Image (cartoon, grey):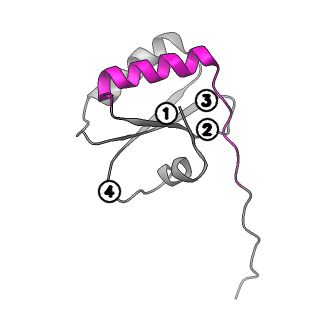
């Protein structure tokens, strides 16, 4: 049996500037609705990782929103969308555990 490793320390997400946070929040709410919950969970200063929790079924709106965000923000942006009430998988778990609500 392998030796147990200590639990990894959580990585605090890097804060967004006020202008970035406002622009991201307004843009995502315009495309995905006003009832969304936005979380920033990127620990890497090179990119932005946003998790969106919504009640709506999202298809191409996510990519339209991403295109608008990339017109103003120079860093790579990743958006994950989860429906409320569904099981959270993958890196979306990090957003729930370590993310900061925008």
Stretch of the chain drawn in magenta: 10-34
Q: Are marks 1 and 3 in contact (CB under 8 Å)?
A: yes
Q: CA distance from mark 3 to mark 2?
A: 7 Å
Q: Secondary structure at mark 2?
A: loop
Of marks 1 and 4, which one's residue comes earlier in the chain?
Answer: 1
Label 3 vs label 4: CA separation? 27 Å
Residue 59, relative to residue 94: is it above or below? above
Q: Are marks 2 and 1 in contact (CB under 8 Å)?
A: yes
| Discs 3/2, front | 2
Going from N to C along the chain, the mark reached first, 2 or 1, is 2
* Residue, disc 3: 47
Secondary structure category for the residue under label 4: loop
Q: Earlier in the sequence, mark 4 or mark 2?
A: 2
Q: Position of residue 93 (x, y in %)?
A: 51, 54
Separation of residues labelled 1 and 4 (CA atoms): 20 Å
* Number of numbered discs on residues: 4
Tag 3–tag 4 contact (CB < 8 Å): no
Dots 3 and 2: beta carbons under 8 Å? yes
């Amino acid at each position: 049996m392998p030796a147990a490793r200590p639990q990894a320390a959580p990585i605090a997400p890097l804060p967004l500037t006020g202008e970035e946070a406002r622009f991201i929040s307004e843009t995502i709410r315009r495309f995905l609705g006003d009832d969304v919950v936005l979380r920033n969970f990127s620990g890497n200063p090179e990119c932005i990782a946003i998790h969106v929790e919504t009640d709506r079924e999202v298809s191409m709106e996510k990519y339209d929103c991403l295109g608008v965000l990339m017109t103003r923000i120079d860093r790579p942006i990743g958006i994950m969308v989860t429906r409320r009430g569904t099981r959270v998988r993958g890196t979306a778990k990090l957003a729930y555990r370590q993310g900061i609500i925008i």
